[in-house]
Image (spheres, rainbow, N blue to C red):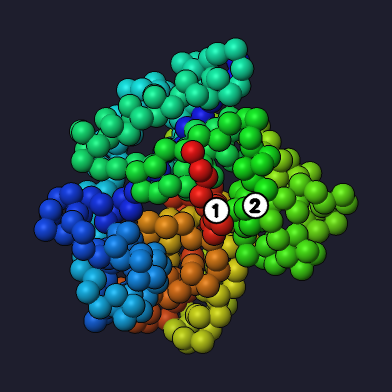
Amino acid sequence: MFRVLLHLDMDAFFASVEQRDNPSLLGRPVIVGSPPTQRGVVCAASYEARKYGVRSAMPSVTAGRLCPSGVFLRPRMEAYQHESREVMAVVGEFAGGLIQQVSIDEAYVDVSPRCQADSADASLELARPLAQEIKDAIRQRRQLTATIGIAPNKLLAKLASDFQKPDGLTLIRASEKVAFLRPLPVRALHGIGPATESVLVRAGLRTVGDLQDHPGDLRALVGSWGPELKRFACGEDNRPLDYSDEVKSISSENTFLKDTDDRPILRACLREQADEIAGKLQRHRLAAHTVQVKVRYGDFTTLTRQCSVEEPLVEAREIYRLGCWLLARDRLVTRPLRLLGLGVSSLTESAAQQMLLPLAR
């Protein structure tokens, strides 16, 4: 059986829900997060706001400076979670149980059983009208738009959904996958974060085509991941879909020898934890949408606080900044801490970024 996968990515999900629910916001730069007059961060931004350079996890004061006309709205996570369930229910009508939801607004869909022909490319072409049906159903029933990528594996389906946003539909044929990948920067490949990108660029490997042509053993640069990276560069990916509902998270905790509220000590602790978490995210080729802090006082009272952002987090400095913000927002350090913890959840595969060329179709 030829493999046919879709990757569905809702367009500017949080902001789009707000614009749908309040039509006066249509066409305006909507920024979901704390107002710029308060210490806080951006959770999501509409495409109108992104034109000004506004991005998730950015300090709200910076977003206000970049986009003075921005409409700032407090996040309504319950509304977004409800909408996510409704959207995935629509998708389920077309795919049955063959869905791997990877975040609140993204999912892989295996449509192989419904799309079989006498070749891999012909099978993929059969998925185009089905993908359009899913997009139309979401638009008609939920008044929202989605972008869908069609490809023979997860790596390529994700890349395809990053093209022609918003409201796009891109198909990567099996016969064209190597040529499709060649001009992309190495950072576009699943699992390559800033640190790995720096190593590859220093070695003269700037594009996926450079990786495809590299005659040496990539293990000299990226360790045991080298063979898999080479396969990714050639568009090969045999990772299965994961249909489990297991909640995945990564965290780090420190119990202090002596209870402390010393700010430099706490910041240094958070910085080390963020570095550790970011390293694990990169090793597993994951990104996170939620950051959580945990504090325990001398009397063993324990509190946790969290925030979610729409665009995935992969870098230590972003995780650290959000951890510091949560401590300050909820005034958690009003007395010495026995324990301080930092964690991430709502994990998804690390996002492809910095696309160079649109796919002409």
Query: Residue 291's image quarter?
Result: bottom left
Which x, y percent locates residue 208? 69, 51
110 sits left or right of 72 in the view? right
**Residue nearest the viewer, comparing 125 with 353:** 125
- The amino acid at mark 1 is Leu
Position of residue 113 relative to residue 264, above or below, is above
* Marks 1,2: beta carbons within 8 A: yes
Which x, y percent locates residue 127? 46, 24
**Residue nearest the viewer, comparing 319 with 127:** 127
Which x, y percent locates residue 248? 50, 46
- Residue at left offset 45%, top offset 74%: 321
Query: Residue 236's image quarter?
Result: top right
Label 2 sits on a secondary structure element that is loop
Which x, y percent locates residue 304? 37, 63
Residue labelled with disc 1: 357
At label 1, counting other C-alpha atoms closer than 10 Å, the crowd grade (few under 14, some 14-19, many 20 or more) is few
Label 1 sits on a secondary structure element that is loop
Q: Which mark is residue 183?
A: 2
Position of residue 201 relative to residue 1, above or below, is below
The quadrant of the image that shows the N terminus is top right
